[in-house]
Amino acid sequence: MTILAIILLIAIGIALLILEILVLPGLIAGIIGGVFILAGVLITYSNYGSEAGHITAILSAVISSATVIYFLRSKSWQRFGLNSKLEGKTNEVDKLPVAEGDYGITISALRPMGTIMVGNIRIEAQTKGEMIAENTQVKIIRVLPNKVLVEAV
């Protein structure tokens, strides 16, 4: 086998390793790339002797490592990633003007969670496990950061 074929095997192996790391999940491309690199090194050992095999193995490891490091640092792979941010918030009930002991009415059935209306404010509410029908008056028994606990009056 010619030197060009060995270089091509190793180059294809390195390319598959880069694809595995940056694009393709699942280890298949990485394993095939590793097999290509190993095949190139083993063919060099068998055709050109141990000195050429050692040089090929060392150069393959150095070039593979340098290529992976270059592609990870160049940030060229970021165009494949998700760059948007989530700007939403959870319900911050503890900052609303409601307190323990306030009364409200259920807008939806609480099974055990649902929506209540306290004054003109819609709030996510939860019972202690019981079901409360729609349009039932409830009393707030505890205010948590993202919901309130209620019981039927």
Image: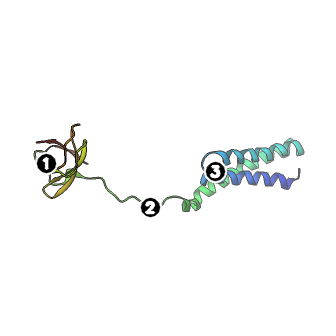
Q: Are marks 1 and 2 in contact (CB under 8 Å)?
A: no
Which residue position holds label 1? 99
- Give the CA distance from mark 1 to mark 3: 54 Å
Which residue position holds label 3? 20
**Percent position of residue 142, x then y:** 17, 42
For image coordinates 88% across by 53% down, the residue present is 2
Q: Which mark is residue 84?
A: 2
**Percent position of residue 84, x then y:** 44, 61
Q: The C terminus lies in which quarter of the figure?
A: top left
Q: Amino acid at mark 2?
A: Ser
For image coordinates 76% across by 50% down, the residue present is 59
**Is residue 16 shown left or right of residue 146?**
right
**Is residue 5 shown left or right of residue 117?**
right
Up the image or down, 12 lies above or below 79; here it is above
Instruction: Check disc 2: other Cα within 10 Å, few if <14, some if 14-19, many if 20+.
Output: few
Instruction: Check disc 3: other Cα within 10 Å, few if <14, some if 14-19, many if 20+.
Output: some
Q: Amino acid at mark 3?
A: Glu
**Is residue 108 shown left or right of residue 5?**
left
Foreground residue among 24 and 56? 24
Q: Amino acid at mark 1?
A: Ala
**Percent position of residue 122, x then y:** 20, 55
- Give the CA distance from mark 3 to mark 2: 24 Å
**Percent position of residue 86, x then y:** 39, 58
Q: Quadrant of residue 57?
A: top right
Residue at disc 1, secondary structure: loop
Which mark is first along the chain, 3 or 1? 3
Instruction: Check disc 1: other Cα within 10 Å, few if <14, some if 14-19, many if 20+.
Output: some
